[in-house]
Amino acid sequence: TSPPVEGRGVINSRQFLSHDLIFPIEYKSYNEVKTELENTELANNYKDKKVDIFGVPYFYTCIIPKSEPDINQNFGGCCMYGALTFNSSENERDKLITVQVTIDNRQSLGFTITTNKNMVTIQELDYKARHWLTK
């Protein structure tokens, strides 16, 4: 699996549509990450504020560079949905989240994942749980 996109304390550099934000985050060979949100109101809630990002791209080479007016030319970033929370303090302690796995209505195992954020996205929990289960 691909590694997640992660960013701490980043501010969007621009916007393409009213419901997305573009961040200057290096990921693989890309230098920007676009996150699409449910609506304009949610995008405005995070716009120009420090945020933490944790998510998995659904598409690569999907951002048109700001210097390129032709939509058919040189795409330069990856895209994902949501994955934003307001920036947590850099000094946050790791928090343990216990995941219980149930098969056929019986608990078969449990494990712990960690985060250093006060607010965690479902994408982060999902990615970390799947990563633990597949290693």
Image: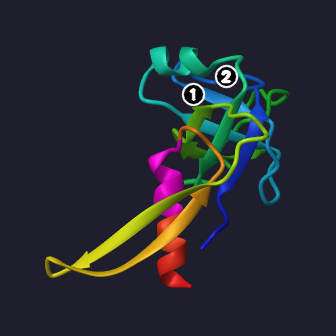
Residue 134, compared with residue 16, is above or below; it is below
Quadrant position of residue 49: top right
Q: Is residue 73 visible?
A: no
Q: Residue at x 53, y 44 (%)?
A: 120
Circle 1 residue: 20
Q: Position of residue 53 (x, y in %)?
A: 65, 42
Number of numbered markers: 2
> Could you tell me the amino acid type at mark 2?
Gln
Under circle 1, the secondary element is strand
76 or 13: nearer the eye? 13
Taking depth in this image into account, of 118 and 28 the one nearest to the observer is 118
Q: Which residues are magenta?
A: 120-127
Which of the numbered marks, if any, corresponds to residue 15? 2
Q: Nearer the viewer, residue 28 or 8?
A: 8
Residue 3, quarter of picture: bottom right
Residue 105 appearing in the image: yes
Q: Quadrant of the N terminus?
A: bottom right
Question: Is residue 127 depicted above or below 20 in this figure?
Answer: below
